[in-house]
Image (cartoon, grey):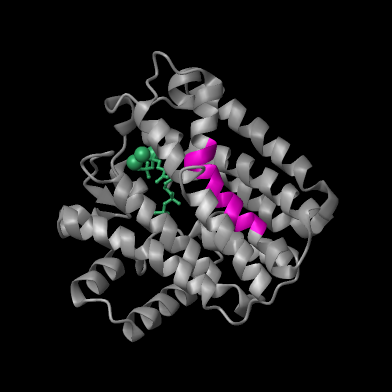
Amino acid sequence: MTLGKNYNHLRSDIDQLLIKRLEISKFPATLIDAIKYIFINKGKKVRAILLAESCALFDVEYTKILNVALALECVHSYSLIHDDLPAMDDDDYRRGELTLHKKYDEATAILAGDALISLAFELISGDEALSAGSRLQLINNLAVYSGGNGMVGGQILDLGLKPAEASIESIREMQQMKTGDLFCFAFTAGPIIAGYGSDDQDKLFEFGKLFGLVFQISDDLIDVESTLAEAGKYVNKDQNMDKATYVDHYGIKKAKKLMLSYIEESKVVLEKYGSKAQPLIGLCESLSSRKS
Ligand code: IPE
Ligand code: IPE
Ligand code: MG
Ligand code: MG
Ligand code: MG
């Protein structure tokens, strides 16, 4: 299985759901245009795919997951819009085209990101296909994993961490927060929606932290080994911006070796689910060869 080959139906369903939500909203036209520009037919939508596979592992019907999957992709897209701003990574390309602040302007990019966060919570809280208990837990997890304890916290650590003084523990913590925590939301959504308890949620959380680490190491490898055309975003940014990464810390060869060892570790975490966990494991394995 390779990332991006078998999930076009899900990607299209997520896009159509967002278009419908925007149509019935009272969002001003500029905001709608900006959100559609960065989201529709763009991005791999990996987090939605992982959430769908986590739900499949716990036998949740596909129709029940779309609002939550869209909510997660909204938060992820906001994180990228803000990550690209001049005050952060200052990037001109994202998802194969100009970043939102380049296409529009910085204020529009900031506000489109803000609107996507709020929309995410609206989507989950208003989803009547889910029990009130599941909704509350998902909302709480999304708040925790995307905020100062999670993605935003990791992003601020990323800004402050310089290769010269960074320990591998500090790099790992930063990467698991900035990238891993949103994956943890995706993976724990399955047991939460299906009504399973903390044992299963903890297992999927643990898998999410490792998946996030593997995903970020593969992103950092793309930064040194890929091209703008292939990756859809500038490459060689991490060194230019003096970013602390596994690749910078260990070199390409050892970073790849560690990535493979984290993939093996992640398989052990899901052992109790047997062959039913194969789609999730296959997606994790496919990260080591991804080019975008
Ligand atoms: C990029 O995420 C940011 C990281 C966490 C490394 P993706 O590689 O999933 O980006 P899109 O959504 O496909 O554009
Ligand atoms: C971003 O990491 C992680 C986020 C939480 C957005 P990067 O800064 O490495 O992501 P890219 O390379 O710009 O996609
Ligand atoms: Mg960044
Ligand atoms: Mg960046
Ligand atoms: Mg990167």
Task: Please say if 206 is above or below 175.
Answer: below
Residue at (75, 71) in percent of width and height: 59
Q: Residue lying at the far top in this picture: please name it.
A: 164
The magenta segment is 176-188
Residue 225 in sight in this render: no
Between 130 and 40, which is closer to the camera in this rendering?
130
Between 8 and 212, which is closer to the camera in this rendering?
212
Q: Residue lying at the far bottom in this picture: please name it.
A: 24
Residue 30 image offset from top left, x and y in percent:
19, 72
Q: Quadrant of the N terminus?
A: bottom right
Residue 28 image offset from top left, x and y in percent:
21, 76
Residue at (48, 51) in percent of width and height: 146
Residue 135 image offset from top left, x and y in percent:
61, 69
- Position of 119 with respect to 212 (left or right) is left
- Ligand 5, by image quadrant, is top left
Q: For residue 166, which quarter of the picture?
A: top left
Task: Please say if 182 is above or below 159.
Answer: below
Residue 34 image offset from top left, x and y in percent:
24, 66
Residue 65 magenta? no
Residue at (41, 73) in percent of width and height: 15
- Position of 23 with respect to 13 (left or right) is left
Between 9 and 187, which is closer to the camera in this rendering?
187
Task: Please say if 83 is above or below 25.
Answer: above
- Position of 41 with respect to 63 (left or right) is left
Task: Please say if 147 is above or below 114.
Answer: above
Residue 184 magenta? yes
Residue at (56, 23) in percent of width and height: 169
Question: In terms of secondary structure, what is the magenta stretch mainly?
Answer: helix
